[in-house]
Image (cartoon, rainbow, N blue to C red):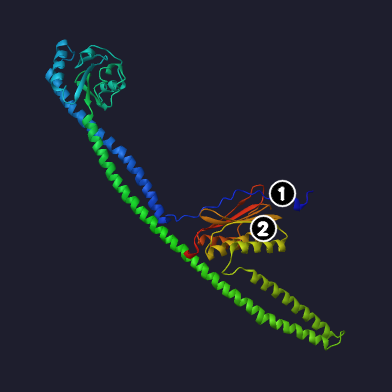
């Protein structure tokens, strides 16, 4: 079996630094952003739908007007139930007199066989064509208005007339239903110009409204960003003050342990040694004094260990790279882990950032020692464009598990100053721990 120390070292992923958390819009800003998006969608929809609705109303109004004219033409021509040549000539005259002109540029009168019996275009008169769906619907009694399909053969002479709108007006006979259908072509220049004006007015109004909303959204975002920045700066100040208080308390505890407990322990130990010399070696009192001397020495050893740990805790003047270097050396000596440390960070981070990153590295290495079953670790201190990170990669089991109190506390501290933690499986096995803080000048604290 391959020896444990020969396990493959962890593969090193690219030095990607997580981005700094932005100042987000916050709940109010997010709601305003959703409202702005909804407004833009509604504005776009209305800018398209309203002109369409107006166009349909204008076309319906024009169709009604044309239908009145057609009714007058039919009444004036007085066609019989079965159209005679005389009736058709009368219709032709009435059409040319009452319909052709102004914006109406083409008229076709169809009978039920698909034959054009009357038109201002003489080449169409008497021609029979396959009836379109709209024409069939008109013979069923429907009034149709739309943009014409000029590709149909009956529209071959209409293609150079311009932008047109087409109207199918059925003419009903009381006993025979719809006998003829008027197909009327109207120039749409005036209609298109009117719709363009309406569309422009709608877009201007919606544009002004959207601009005002976006301005309000921007103001809300700026206000929220400033509030977030103030909150972060306040968190940094509080953490900095806490670190200073902890430094003062650490110094006081070191002094108290050394002077108030350490010195009396020495006197007790010396007193016990002097007392042992006053009694015989085979006396029960000598044995008891020897036992007490051993207990005092054990307490002294524990006290020295705690004092050493307290002295090794970086203080308020922490140099992050030096502190992590010393941390790596201590962890290697105490755990037997093989740790590779790399540093590429020159930025002078605020105290709160430096101390929080250091403690994140210490928490990560502690978890590797306790839970990862690893023997090789890579620790990197990396400066990115807007973040600085501590990365700890081990070649252990890769089981992350539920974050404990230490990780949760570390995450809370990092998030309080705009940073965070990402824990994931490393390439090739093991765990990758990344803690980052935003790059900010020292004077921001």
Specify few, some or many for label 1: CA neighbours under 10 Å numbering under 14, 14-19, or 20 or more.
few
Q: Which mark is residue 368?
A: 2
* Residue 8: assigned label: 1
Task: Name above or below for residue 203 compared with residue 155.
Answer: below
Judge the density around disc 2: few (<14), some (14-19), many (≥20) Cα neighbours within 10 Å. many
Task: Please report contact status of discs 1 and 2: CB closer than 8 Å, yes or no.
Answer: no
Q: Residue at x 62, y 63 (%)?
A: 322
Looking at this view, is 265 or 57 the one in front? 265
Q: Residue furthest front?
A: 346
Q: CA distance from mark 1 to mark 2?
A: 17 Å
State the mark number for residue 150. none
Q: Secondary structure at mark 2?
A: helix
Q: Which residue appears farthest toward the bottom when viewing the image?
A: 278
Disc tally is 2
- Residue 303 image-quadrant placement: bottom right
* Place of residue 240 in the rendered image (x, y in percent of width and height, measured from the top left): 52, 68
In the displayed structure, 382 sits above or below 168; it is below
Image position of 167 (left or right of 420) = left
- 52 and 316: which one is in front? 316
Q: x, y (%) of residue 384?
A: 54, 53
Residue 247 image point, x, y percent: 57, 72
In this rendering, the label closer to the viewer, 1 or 2: 1
Instruction: Judge by depth and name the residue closer to the eye, 146 or 36.
Output: 36
Residue 374 visible within the image: no
Which residue reaches farthest right? 282
| Mark 1 vs 2, N-terminal side | 1
Q: Position of residue 68 (x, y in %)?
A: 16, 26
Residue drawn at x 77%, y 84% as measured from the top left? 272
Q: Residue at x 18, y 13 (%)?
A: 83
Whether 1 is drawn above or below 335: the answer is above
Which quadrant of the view contains residue 88? Answer: top left
SS at circle 1: loop
């Amino acid at each position: 079996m391959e020896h444990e120390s020969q396990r493959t070292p962890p593969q090193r992923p690219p030095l990607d630094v997580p981005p700094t958390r932005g100042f987000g819009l916050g709940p109010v800003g997010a709601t305003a952003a959703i409202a702005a998006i909804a407004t833009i969608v509604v504005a776009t929809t209305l800018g398209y739908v309203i002109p369409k609705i107006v166009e349909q109303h204008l076309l319906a109004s024009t169709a009604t007007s044309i239908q009145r004219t057609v009714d007058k033409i039919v009444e004036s021509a007085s066609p019989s139930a079965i159209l005679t040549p005389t009736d058709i000539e009368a219709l032709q005259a009435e059409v040319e007199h009452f319909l052709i002109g102004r914006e109406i540029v083409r008229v076709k009168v169809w009978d039920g066989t698909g034959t054009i019996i009357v038109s201002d275009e003489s080449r169409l008169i008497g021609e029979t064509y396959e009836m379109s769906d709209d024409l069939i619907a008109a013979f069923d009694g429907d009034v149709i208005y739309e943009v014409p399909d000029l590709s149909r053969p009956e529209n071959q002479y209409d293609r150079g007339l311009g932008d047109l709108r087409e109207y199918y007006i059925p003419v009903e006979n009381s006993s025979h239903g719809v006998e003829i259908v008027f197909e009327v072509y109207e120039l749409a220049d005036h209609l298109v110009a009117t719709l363009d004006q309406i569309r422009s007015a709608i877009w201007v109004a919606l544009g002004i409204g959207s601009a005002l909303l976006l301005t309000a959204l921007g103001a809300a975002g700026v206000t929220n960003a400033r509030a977030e920045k103030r909150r972060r700066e306040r968190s940094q100040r509080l953490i900095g003050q806490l670190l200073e208080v902890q430094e003062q308390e650490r110094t006081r505890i070191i002094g108290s342990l050394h002077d108030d407990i350490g010195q009396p322990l020495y006197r007790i130990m010396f007193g016990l040694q002097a007392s042992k010399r006053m009694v015989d070696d085979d006396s029960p009192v000598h044995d008891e004094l020897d036992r007490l001397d051993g207990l005092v020495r054990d307490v002294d050893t524990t006290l020295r260990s705690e004092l050493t740990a307290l002295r090794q805790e970086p203080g308020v003047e922490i140099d992050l790279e030096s502190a992590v270097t010393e941390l790596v050396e201590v962890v290697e000596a105490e755990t037997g882990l093989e740790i590779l440390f790399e540093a590429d960070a020159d930025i002078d981070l605020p105290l709160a950032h430096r101390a929080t990153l250091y403690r994140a590295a210490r928490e990560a290495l502690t978890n590797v020692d306790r839970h990862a079953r690893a023997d090789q670790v890579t620790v990197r201190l990396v400066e990115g464009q807007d973040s600085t990170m501590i990365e700890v990669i081990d070649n252990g089991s890769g089981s992350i598990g539920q974050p404990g109190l230490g990780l949760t506390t570390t995450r809370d501290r990092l998030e309080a100053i705009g940073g965070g933690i990402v824990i994931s499986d490393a390439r090739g096995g093991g765990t990758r721990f990344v803690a980052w803080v935003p790059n900010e000048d020292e004077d921001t604290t």
